[in-house]
Image (tube, helix red, strand yellow):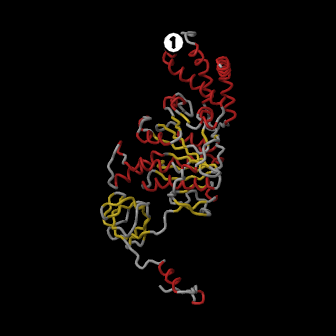
Amino acid sequence: MLSETPASELPVYSNLGTYISEIEKFPAVRKEGRVMQVIGHMVEATNPGCSVGGMCKIYNPATKSSVTAEVVGFRKDRMLIMPLHNAHGIGPKCRIIPEDRPAMVPVGDGLLGRVIDPLMRPMDGLGELSTSTEVPLYPEVVNPMNRQRIKKPLDVGVRSINACLTCGRGQRIGIMAGSGVGKSVLLGMMARYTDADINVISLVGERGKEVREFIEDNLGEEGMRRSVVIVATSDQPPLLRMRGAYIATSIAEHFRNEGQDVLLSMDSLTRFAMAQREIGLAAGEPPTTKGYPPSVFALLPGLLERTGTHDGPGSITGFYTVLVEGDDANDPIADAIRAIVDGHIYLSREIAEKGTYPAVDLLSSTSRVMVDVVGEKHLKLNQIMRRTLATYREAEDLINIGAYVQGSNPEIDYAITKKPLIQEFIQQGMNEHTDLKECEEHILQIFGDRLEEDTTREENSA
Protein backbone atom coordinates (compact mmCIF):
# COMPACT_ATOMS: atom_id res chain seq x y z
CA MET A 1 0.00 0.00 0.00
CA LEU A 2 1.36 3.43 -0.97
CA SER A 3 2.03 6.02 1.73
CA GLU A 4 -0.54 8.80 1.95
CA THR A 5 1.91 11.23 3.58
CA PRO A 6 2.01 14.55 1.61
CA ALA A 7 5.26 15.18 -0.22
CA SER A 8 5.75 18.39 1.76
CA GLU A 9 5.93 16.39 5.00
CA LEU A 10 8.45 13.81 3.78
CA PRO A 11 12.00 14.20 5.18
CA VAL A 12 14.52 15.83 2.85
CA TYR A 13 18.10 14.50 2.90
CA SER A 14 21.04 16.44 1.56
CA ASN A 15 23.05 13.58 0.05
CA LEU A 16 22.59 10.22 -1.64
CA GLY A 17 24.37 8.30 1.16
CA THR A 18 21.66 9.24 3.65
CA TYR A 19 18.98 7.94 1.29
CA ILE A 20 20.84 4.64 0.91
CA SER A 21 21.28 4.19 4.68
CA GLU A 22 17.56 4.86 5.23
CA ILE A 23 16.58 2.32 2.56
CA GLU A 24 18.92 -0.32 4.04
CA LYS A 25 16.98 -0.20 7.31
CA PHE A 26 14.07 -1.97 5.62
CA PRO A 27 14.53 -5.69 4.79
CA ALA A 28 14.40 -6.43 1.08
CA VAL A 29 12.75 -9.80 1.72
CA ARG A 30 10.75 -10.89 4.76
CA LYS A 31 11.66 -14.46 5.60
CA GLU A 32 9.00 -16.83 6.87
CA GLY A 33 9.00 -20.37 8.18
CA ARG A 34 6.39 -23.13 8.01
CA VAL A 35 5.07 -25.46 10.71
CA MET A 36 6.16 -29.03 9.96
CA GLN A 37 5.13 -30.97 13.06
CA VAL A 38 3.34 -30.46 16.40
CA ILE A 39 3.86 -32.82 19.35
CA GLY A 40 2.29 -31.74 22.61
CA HIS A 41 3.34 -28.15 23.26
CA MET A 42 6.39 -28.41 20.98
CA VAL A 43 6.18 -27.10 17.40
CA GLU A 44 8.75 -28.08 14.75
CA ALA A 45 9.17 -25.59 11.91
CA THR A 46 11.54 -24.47 9.18
CA ASN A 47 13.81 -21.67 10.38
CA PRO A 48 13.25 -18.16 8.97
CA GLY A 49 16.41 -16.91 10.66
CA CYS A 50 15.54 -17.10 14.37
CA SER A 51 17.90 -17.91 17.25
CA VAL A 52 17.38 -19.49 20.68
CA GLY A 53 15.39 -17.17 22.92
CA GLY A 54 13.99 -15.26 19.93
CA MET A 55 10.29 -14.53 19.63
CA CYS A 56 8.08 -15.26 16.64
CA LYS A 57 4.42 -15.35 15.60
CA ILE A 58 2.65 -18.50 14.45
CA TYR A 59 0.09 -17.21 11.95
CA ASN A 60 -2.92 -19.32 10.97
CA PRO A 61 -4.22 -18.15 7.54
CA ALA A 62 -7.48 -20.07 7.97
CA THR A 63 -8.55 -18.20 11.12
CA LYS A 64 -6.41 -15.10 10.47
CA SER A 65 -5.16 -15.32 14.05
CA SER A 66 -1.64 -15.56 15.48
CA VAL A 67 0.04 -17.00 18.57
CA THR A 68 3.29 -15.72 20.09
CA ALA A 69 5.99 -18.37 20.56
CA GLU A 70 9.60 -18.59 21.71
CA VAL A 71 12.47 -20.53 20.11
CA VAL A 72 13.74 -23.13 22.59
CA GLY A 73 16.12 -25.16 20.41
CA PHE A 74 17.03 -26.68 17.06
CA ARG A 75 16.96 -30.20 15.67
CA LYS A 76 19.10 -30.51 12.53
CA ASP A 77 17.66 -27.95 10.08
CA ARG A 78 14.40 -27.51 11.98
CA MET A 79 13.76 -25.10 14.85
CA LEU A 80 11.79 -26.04 17.95
CA ILE A 81 9.39 -23.39 19.18
CA MET A 82 6.93 -23.39 22.05
CA PRO A 83 3.77 -21.24 22.04
CA LEU A 84 3.03 -18.99 25.00
CA HIS A 85 -0.59 -20.21 24.76
CA ASN A 86 -2.01 -23.66 24.01
CA ALA A 87 -1.30 -25.23 20.63
CA HIS A 88 -4.94 -25.55 19.52
CA GLY A 89 -5.41 -24.55 15.88
CA ILE A 90 -1.71 -24.82 14.92
CA GLY A 91 -1.17 -27.01 11.86
CA PRO A 92 1.06 -27.58 8.79
CA LYS A 93 -0.38 -24.58 6.93
CA CYS A 94 0.65 -22.10 9.60
CA ARG A 95 3.39 -19.54 8.86
CA ILE A 96 6.22 -18.55 11.21
CA ILE A 97 7.00 -14.82 11.22
CA PRO A 98 10.05 -13.79 13.30
CA GLU A 99 9.94 -10.74 15.57
CA ASP A 100 12.97 -8.48 15.26
CA ARG A 101 12.97 -6.96 18.75
CA PRO A 102 14.16 -8.82 21.88
CA ALA A 103 11.73 -9.72 24.66
CA MET A 104 11.07 -6.61 26.79
CA VAL A 105 9.10 -5.98 30.00
CA PRO A 106 7.15 -2.72 30.53
CA VAL A 107 7.80 -1.41 34.07
CA GLY A 108 7.02 1.58 36.26
CA ASP A 109 5.47 2.68 39.55
CA GLY A 110 2.03 2.03 38.06
CA LEU A 111 2.60 -1.71 38.62
CA LEU A 112 2.39 -1.31 42.41
CA GLY A 113 -0.78 -2.81 43.85
CA ARG A 114 -1.49 -4.77 40.65
CA VAL A 115 -1.89 -8.45 39.82
CA ILE A 116 -0.62 -9.38 36.34
CA ASP A 117 0.00 -12.50 34.26
CA PRO A 118 3.28 -13.50 32.51
CA LEU A 119 2.23 -11.58 29.38
CA MET A 120 1.94 -8.36 31.43
CA ARG A 121 -1.86 -8.35 31.21
CA PRO A 122 -3.85 -7.19 34.27
CA MET A 123 -5.77 -9.89 36.14
CA ASP A 124 -7.33 -7.72 38.87
CA GLY A 125 -9.93 -5.86 36.81
CA LEU A 126 -8.42 -2.46 37.68
CA GLY A 127 -7.92 -1.31 34.10
CA GLU A 128 -4.84 -1.00 31.92
CA LEU A 129 -1.34 -0.99 33.38
CA SER A 130 0.49 2.33 33.68
CA THR A 131 4.17 1.89 32.80
CA SER A 132 6.95 4.36 32.08
CA THR A 133 9.74 2.38 30.40
CA GLU A 134 10.85 -1.06 29.22
CA VAL A 135 13.62 -3.36 30.45
CA PRO A 136 15.02 -6.58 28.91
CA LEU A 137 13.47 -9.88 29.98
CA TYR A 138 16.91 -11.56 29.84
CA PRO A 139 19.49 -8.88 30.81
CA GLU A 140 23.16 -9.35 31.53
CA VAL A 141 24.01 -10.41 35.09
CA VAL A 142 25.76 -7.80 37.27
CA ASN A 143 29.58 -8.07 37.26
CA PRO A 144 30.56 -9.78 40.56
CA MET A 145 33.22 -7.12 41.19
CA ASN A 146 30.57 -4.40 40.91
CA ARG A 147 28.37 -5.86 43.63
CA GLN A 148 28.43 -4.15 47.00
CA ARG A 149 28.93 -6.40 50.00
CA ILE A 150 25.88 -7.18 52.14
CA LYS A 151 26.21 -5.15 55.33
CA LYS A 152 22.66 -4.07 56.31
CA PRO A 153 20.04 -6.35 57.91
CA LEU A 154 16.55 -6.74 56.48
CA ASP A 155 13.70 -6.86 58.99
CA VAL A 156 11.08 -9.41 57.87
CA GLY A 157 8.89 -9.21 60.99
CA VAL A 158 9.16 -12.95 61.78
CA ARG A 159 10.74 -13.67 65.18
CA SER A 160 12.46 -16.97 64.37
CA ILE A 161 14.10 -15.46 61.26
CA ASN A 162 14.97 -12.04 62.71
CA ALA A 163 16.53 -13.57 65.83
CA CYS A 164 18.28 -16.71 64.59
CA LEU A 165 18.47 -16.43 60.79
CA THR A 166 18.90 -12.67 60.31
CA CYS A 167 18.83 -11.77 56.61
CA GLY A 168 20.80 -9.05 54.84
CA ARG A 169 19.62 -6.66 52.13
CA GLY A 170 20.62 -8.40 48.91
CA GLN A 171 20.70 -11.94 50.29
CA ARG A 172 19.10 -14.95 48.58
CA ILE A 173 17.32 -17.48 50.81
CA GLY A 174 15.74 -20.83 49.95
CA ILE A 175 12.69 -21.89 51.98
CA MET A 176 12.74 -25.70 51.90
CA ALA A 177 9.60 -27.63 52.82
CA GLY A 178 7.18 -30.34 51.80
CA SER A 179 3.61 -29.58 50.79
CA GLY A 180 1.25 -28.07 53.35
CA VAL A 181 3.87 -27.01 55.91
CA GLY A 182 3.30 -23.26 55.65
CA LYS A 183 5.60 -21.87 52.93
CA SER A 184 3.00 -19.53 51.42
CA VAL A 185 1.85 -18.25 54.82
CA LEU A 186 5.47 -17.46 55.77
CA LEU A 187 6.02 -15.60 52.47
CA GLY A 188 2.85 -13.59 53.07
CA MET A 189 3.94 -12.63 56.60
CA MET A 190 7.33 -11.44 55.38
CA ALA A 191 5.82 -9.47 52.49
CA ARG A 192 3.38 -7.79 54.88
CA TYR A 193 5.84 -6.91 57.67
CA THR A 194 9.18 -6.38 55.92
CA ASP A 195 10.86 -2.98 55.99
CA ALA A 196 11.82 -3.34 52.30
CA ASP A 197 10.45 -0.59 50.04
CA ILE A 198 8.85 -2.82 47.38
CA ASN A 199 7.49 -6.39 47.25
CA VAL A 200 7.61 -8.34 43.99
CA ILE A 201 5.80 -11.67 44.33
CA SER A 202 5.88 -14.41 41.70
CA LEU A 203 3.40 -17.28 42.04
CA VAL A 204 4.70 -19.97 39.67
CA GLY A 205 2.63 -23.08 39.01
CA GLU A 206 0.15 -22.38 41.82
CA ARG A 207 -3.37 -23.81 41.83
CA GLY A 208 -5.84 -21.20 40.62
CA LYS A 209 -7.89 -21.22 43.83
CA GLU A 210 -4.81 -20.43 45.94
CA VAL A 211 -3.99 -17.17 44.17
CA ARG A 212 -6.82 -15.10 45.61
CA GLU A 213 -6.44 -16.79 49.00
CA PHE A 214 -2.77 -15.77 49.11
CA ILE A 215 -3.48 -12.16 48.09
CA GLU A 216 -6.43 -11.61 50.45
CA ASP A 217 -5.49 -13.78 53.46
CA ASN A 218 -1.69 -13.97 53.52
CA LEU A 219 -0.64 -10.71 51.85
CA GLY A 220 -3.56 -8.53 52.91
CA GLU A 221 -4.42 -4.97 51.93
CA GLU A 222 -1.41 -3.58 53.82
CA GLY A 223 1.08 -5.75 51.93
CA MET A 224 -0.65 -5.36 48.56
CA ARG A 225 -0.26 -1.56 48.49
CA ARG A 226 3.49 -1.79 47.86
CA SER A 227 3.49 -5.09 45.96
CA VAL A 228 3.47 -6.35 42.39
CA VAL A 229 2.07 -9.88 42.02
CA ILE A 230 2.84 -11.97 38.92
CA VAL A 231 0.67 -15.08 38.56
CA ALA A 232 1.35 -18.11 36.34
CA THR A 233 -1.05 -20.89 37.33
CA SER A 234 -0.38 -24.62 36.96
CA ASP A 235 -2.71 -24.99 33.95
CA GLN A 236 -0.67 -22.62 31.79
CA PRO A 237 2.01 -23.81 29.31
CA PRO A 238 5.47 -24.41 30.80
CA LEU A 239 7.00 -21.47 28.93
CA LEU A 240 4.53 -19.08 30.58
CA ARG A 241 5.29 -20.49 34.02
CA MET A 242 9.00 -19.87 33.46
CA ARG A 243 8.31 -16.45 32.00
CA GLY A 244 6.48 -15.48 35.20
CA ALA A 245 9.71 -15.99 37.17
CA TYR A 246 11.80 -14.02 34.67
CA ILE A 247 9.30 -11.13 34.52
CA ALA A 248 9.20 -10.87 38.32
CA THR A 249 13.00 -10.71 38.40
CA SER A 250 13.10 -8.02 35.67
CA ILE A 251 10.56 -5.90 37.56
CA ALA A 252 12.58 -6.29 40.77
CA GLU A 253 15.76 -5.26 38.90
CA HIS A 254 14.03 -2.10 37.65
CA PHE A 255 13.09 -0.99 41.17
CA ARG A 256 16.55 -1.91 42.49
CA ASN A 257 18.21 0.18 39.79
CA GLU A 258 16.08 3.11 40.96
CA GLY A 259 17.61 2.80 44.43
CA GLN A 260 14.81 0.84 46.12
CA ASP A 261 15.27 -2.12 48.46
CA VAL A 262 13.14 -4.91 46.96
CA LEU A 263 11.88 -8.13 48.54
CA LEU A 264 11.43 -10.70 45.75
CA SER A 265 9.34 -13.71 46.82
CA MET A 266 8.93 -16.67 44.47
CA ASP A 267 6.57 -19.57 45.14
CA SER A 268 7.88 -21.90 43.97
CA LEU A 269 11.28 -22.29 42.37
CA THR A 270 10.69 -26.05 42.11
CA ARG A 271 7.78 -25.50 39.72
CA PHE A 272 10.04 -23.23 37.64
CA ALA A 273 12.46 -26.18 37.40
CA MET A 274 9.60 -28.56 36.56
CA ALA A 275 8.49 -26.26 33.73
CA GLN A 276 11.99 -26.32 32.25
CA ARG A 277 12.01 -30.11 32.67
CA GLU A 278 8.89 -30.29 30.45
CA ILE A 279 10.51 -28.06 27.84
CA GLY A 280 13.88 -29.81 27.94
CA LEU A 281 12.46 -33.31 27.61
CA ALA A 282 10.13 -32.22 24.78
CA ALA A 283 13.14 -30.71 22.98
CA GLY A 284 15.03 -34.01 23.22
CA GLU A 285 17.41 -33.38 26.14
CA PRO A 286 18.55 -36.50 28.01
CA PRO A 287 16.98 -36.94 31.46
CA THR A 288 19.30 -37.08 34.49
CA THR A 289 18.45 -37.23 38.21
CA LYS A 290 14.67 -37.63 38.72
CA GLY A 291 14.12 -36.85 35.05
CA TYR A 292 15.58 -33.33 35.16
CA PRO A 293 17.60 -32.48 32.01
CA PRO A 294 20.98 -30.68 32.31
CA SER A 295 19.47 -27.34 31.23
CA VAL A 296 17.53 -27.10 34.52
CA PHE A 297 20.73 -27.00 36.56
CA ALA A 298 22.19 -24.41 34.16
CA LEU A 299 19.16 -22.09 34.31
CA LEU A 300 18.82 -22.02 38.11
CA PRO A 301 22.04 -20.06 38.83
CA GLY A 302 21.30 -17.78 35.87
CA LEU A 303 17.98 -16.76 37.44
CA LEU A 304 19.20 -16.53 41.04
CA GLU A 305 22.36 -14.54 40.23
CA ARG A 306 20.26 -11.68 38.84
CA THR A 307 19.18 -10.74 42.37
CA GLY A 308 21.33 -9.25 45.13
CA THR A 309 23.18 -5.95 45.28
CA HIS A 310 24.74 -3.91 42.46
CA ASP A 311 27.13 -0.96 42.18
CA GLY A 312 24.67 1.64 43.50
CA PRO A 313 21.97 2.08 46.14
CA GLY A 314 19.16 -0.47 46.14
CA SER A 315 19.07 -4.25 46.50
CA ILE A 316 16.99 -7.34 45.77
CA THR A 317 16.55 -9.77 48.65
CA GLY A 318 15.21 -13.04 47.26
CA PHE A 319 13.11 -15.62 49.10
CA TYR A 320 12.51 -18.74 47.01
CA THR A 321 10.30 -21.59 48.19
CA VAL A 322 11.53 -25.07 47.28
CA LEU A 323 9.06 -27.95 47.32
CA VAL A 324 11.03 -30.98 48.55
CA GLU A 325 9.48 -34.25 47.40
CA GLY A 326 8.67 -36.59 50.27
CA ASP A 327 10.16 -34.06 52.75
CA ASP A 328 13.60 -35.12 51.47
CA ALA A 329 15.98 -32.19 52.04
CA ASN A 330 18.47 -33.87 49.66
CA ASP A 331 16.09 -33.70 46.70
CA PRO A 332 18.23 -32.84 43.59
CA ILE A 333 16.58 -29.44 43.03
CA ALA A 334 16.78 -28.54 46.72
CA ASP A 335 20.42 -29.63 46.79
CA ALA A 336 21.28 -27.55 43.69
CA ILE A 337 19.51 -24.45 45.05
CA ARG A 338 21.11 -24.79 48.49
CA ALA A 339 24.52 -24.58 46.81
CA ILE A 340 23.60 -21.31 45.04
CA VAL A 341 21.72 -19.29 47.67
CA ASP A 342 23.17 -17.48 50.71
CA GLY A 343 21.22 -19.48 53.26
CA HIS A 344 18.21 -21.73 53.66
CA ILE A 345 15.22 -22.03 55.98
CA TYR A 346 13.94 -25.56 56.52
CA LEU A 347 10.28 -25.93 57.53
CA SER A 348 9.71 -29.17 59.43
CA ARG A 349 6.53 -31.22 59.10
CA GLU A 350 7.18 -32.66 62.56
CA ILE A 351 7.21 -29.16 64.10
CA ALA A 352 4.10 -28.17 62.11
CA GLU A 353 2.24 -31.26 63.33
CA LYS A 354 2.82 -30.07 66.91
CA GLY A 355 1.00 -26.84 66.04
CA THR A 356 4.05 -24.56 65.99
CA TYR A 357 3.98 -22.00 63.16
CA PRO A 358 6.08 -20.86 61.41
CA ALA A 359 7.47 -24.42 61.54
CA VAL A 360 11.12 -23.32 61.21
CA ASP A 361 13.68 -25.98 62.14
CA LEU A 362 16.39 -23.66 63.47
CA LEU A 363 19.07 -26.35 63.75
CA SER A 364 18.65 -27.37 60.08
CA SER A 365 18.53 -23.76 58.82
CA THR A 366 21.27 -21.19 58.32
CA SER A 367 21.87 -17.62 57.14
CA ARG A 368 25.34 -17.24 55.66
CA VAL A 369 25.40 -13.44 55.93
CA MET A 370 24.09 -13.12 59.50
CA VAL A 371 27.62 -12.69 60.82
CA ASP A 372 28.00 -9.57 58.61
CA VAL A 373 24.73 -7.82 59.49
CA VAL A 374 24.26 -8.17 63.29
CA GLY A 375 26.34 -7.23 66.33
CA GLU A 376 28.54 -9.50 68.44
CA LYS A 377 26.00 -9.72 71.28
CA HIS A 378 23.25 -10.87 68.90
CA LEU A 379 25.57 -13.52 67.44
CA LYS A 380 26.45 -14.86 70.89
CA LEU A 381 22.78 -15.04 71.90
CA ASN A 382 22.03 -16.93 68.68
CA GLN A 383 24.85 -19.41 69.42
CA ILE A 384 23.52 -19.98 72.95
CA MET A 385 19.99 -20.62 71.63
CA ARG A 386 21.25 -23.10 69.03
CA ARG A 387 23.44 -24.86 71.57
CA THR A 388 20.50 -25.14 73.96
CA LEU A 389 18.17 -26.52 71.27
CA ALA A 390 20.81 -29.04 70.14
CA THR A 391 21.32 -30.24 73.73
CA TYR A 392 17.58 -30.69 74.23
CA ARG A 393 17.18 -32.56 70.92
CA GLU A 394 19.96 -35.02 71.84
CA ALA A 395 18.31 -35.82 75.17
CA GLU A 396 14.68 -35.54 74.02
CA ASP A 397 13.97 -39.27 73.86
CA LEU A 398 15.31 -39.81 77.39
CA ILE A 399 13.29 -36.85 78.67
CA ASN A 400 10.06 -38.02 77.01
CA ILE A 401 10.19 -41.55 78.46
CA GLY A 402 11.17 -40.26 81.91
CA ALA A 403 14.61 -41.88 81.86
CA TYR A 404 16.51 -38.66 82.46
CA VAL A 405 17.18 -37.83 86.12
CA GLN A 406 17.16 -34.13 86.99
CA GLY A 407 20.64 -32.97 88.02
CA SER A 408 22.56 -35.58 86.00
CA ASN A 409 23.77 -33.03 83.45
CA PRO A 410 23.66 -29.25 84.03
CA GLU A 411 23.48 -28.50 80.27
CA ILE A 412 20.43 -30.74 79.84
CA ASP A 413 18.86 -29.21 82.96
CA TYR A 414 19.37 -25.74 81.47
CA ALA A 415 17.88 -26.86 78.12
CA ILE A 416 14.79 -28.30 79.85
CA THR A 417 14.27 -24.99 81.66
CA LYS A 418 14.61 -22.86 78.51
CA LYS A 419 12.75 -25.07 75.99
CA PRO A 420 9.23 -23.76 76.86
CA LEU A 421 10.49 -20.16 76.60
CA ILE A 422 12.05 -20.85 73.19
CA GLN A 423 8.83 -22.50 72.02
CA GLU A 424 6.77 -19.51 73.14
CA PHE A 425 9.17 -17.11 71.40
CA ILE A 426 9.16 -18.98 68.06
CA GLN A 427 5.39 -19.49 67.94
CA GLN A 428 3.91 -16.54 66.01
CA GLY A 429 0.47 -15.82 64.58
CA MET A 430 -0.14 -14.54 61.06
CA ASN A 431 -1.11 -11.11 62.35
CA GLU A 432 1.79 -10.71 64.78
CA HIS A 433 4.77 -8.52 63.92
CA THR A 434 8.06 -8.28 65.84
CA ASP A 435 10.90 -6.10 64.58
CA LEU A 436 14.63 -6.80 64.80
CA LYS A 437 15.24 -4.76 67.95
CA GLU A 438 12.38 -6.44 69.83
CA CYS A 439 13.65 -9.89 68.78
CA GLU A 440 17.11 -9.21 70.20
CA GLU A 441 15.56 -7.94 73.46
CA HIS A 442 13.43 -11.10 73.74
CA ILE A 443 16.31 -13.53 73.32
CA LEU A 444 18.37 -11.42 75.73
CA GLN A 445 15.63 -11.89 78.34
CA ILE A 446 15.69 -15.66 77.76
CA PHE A 447 19.46 -16.21 77.59
CA GLY A 448 20.89 -13.15 79.37
CA ASP A 449 22.00 -15.30 82.33
CA ARG A 450 24.03 -17.66 80.12
CA LEU A 451 25.47 -14.74 78.11
CA GLU A 452 26.70 -13.15 81.34
CA GLU A 453 28.27 -16.44 82.45
CA ASP A 454 30.04 -16.92 79.10
CA THR A 455 31.30 -13.32 79.10
CA THR A 456 32.68 -13.68 82.65
CA ARG A 457 34.37 -16.96 81.74
CA GLU A 458 36.02 -15.39 78.67
CA GLU A 459 37.27 -12.42 80.73
CA ASN A 460 38.73 -14.70 83.38
CA SER A 461 40.43 -16.94 80.83
CA ALA A 462 41.94 -13.88 79.13
Give the quarter of the figure containing the C terminus.
top right
Most foreground residue, 310 or 434: 310
| In the image, farthest residue toward the bottom | 7
Q: Report x, y in % for residue 343.
A: 53, 38
The answer to whether 118 appears left or right of 330 in the picture is right
Label 1 is placed on what type of residue? Gly
Q: Please say if 180 is above or below 69.
A: above
The residue carrying mark 1 is: 402
The answer to whether 123 appears left or right of 238 in the picture is right
Q: Does residue 154 show up?
A: no
Number of other residues with Cα within 10 Å of mark 1, as a class: few under 14, some 14 to 19, many 20 or more: few
Q: Does residue 334 show up?
A: yes
The answer to whether 342 appears left or right of 158 in the picture is left
Q: Please say if 159 is above or below 127.
A: above
Quadrant in the picture for residue 332:
top left
Most foreground residue, 242 or 210: 242
Q: Report x, y in % for residue 65.
A: 43, 70
Q: Report x, y in % for residue 428.
A: 61, 33
Find numbered disc 1 in the image and state the secondary structure of the residue it sits on: loop
The answer to whether 102 appears left or right of 73 in the picture is right
Q: Report x, y in % for residue 57.
A: 42, 68
